Amino acid sequence: MPSLAAELPEFDVRGGWTWAAALTIHPRPGGDGVVYQVGPAGAELGPILTTAVDGAGHFVFSATDARGVPHAIVDGKGVLRAGVRAFVLCELAPSDPGRWRASLWVNGEEIEKREFAADFGGPVRARQSVGAALVGDRRGAFTLSEMMVYFAPLKAATKQGLFSYLAERYGAAG
């Protein structure tokens, strides 16, 4: 079977990236499960951006750089609870040359953020996966009502508008 890698769109995280969803996570025995992942076709190295639920039931957003080093931000406060719909936004934004800001928003509030140094390289031929990792299994257990991906960070007013839209469309989050 011929490789489709040359037909895949280019993915370039250098300008930033935002993922938003109306999401309900479910318990998954046996480890973490991917909700959404984007990265190189063979997922050999980064950039790879992942939203997942870890074995403890915490929501995790990770950005793996071009060298394969993951930079994770975790909902350690347990704001996202199993069986309860939430409106989630994950964002990766350049701050200074070679520095990045990752943030996790739930129901309109920024609950975690992290700054770090990383090199995400240039554009790569990439594919996206919903519900499983690019390589391997790691299937997530979740209900996804709606998902949006932006290849840029969002302005504060746009984020709030997005959360308002999700609340209007799906009702109040848990």
Image (spheres, rainbow, N blue to C red):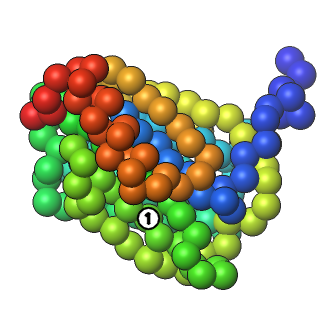
Residue 5 appears at what percent x and percent y? 83, 34
Say what secondary structure mark 1 lies in: strand
**At x 22% / y 55%, what residue is drawn?**
109
Q: Nearer the viewer, residue 97 or 4?
A: 97
Q: Residue furthest front?
A: 157
Residue 71 appears at what percent x and percent y? 47, 67
Quadrant in which the C terminus is drawn = top left
Q: Is residue 147 left or right of residue 118?
A: left
Whether residue 92 is visible here, answered yes or no, is yes
Q: Is residue 158 left or right of residue 145?
A: right
User: Can you say whether 122 is above or below 96 in the image?
Assistant: above
Q: Which residue is mark 1?
A: 102
Locate residue 103: give its quadrant.
bottom left
Residue 140 appears at what percent x and percent y? 35, 31
**At x 49% / y 52%, what residue is drawn?**
154
User: Mark 1 Cα within 10 Å, few/some/many (few <14, many 20+)?
Assistant: many
Disc 1 residue type?
Answer: Ala
User: Can you say whether 59 is above or below 76 in the image?
Assistant: above
Q: Nearer the viewer, residue 3 or 147?
A: 147
**At x 66% / y 81%, what residue is drawn?**
97
Residue 24 appears at what percent x and percent y? 23, 29
**At x 89% / y 34%, what residue is drawn?**
6
Q: Nearer the viewer, residue 122 or 149?
A: 149
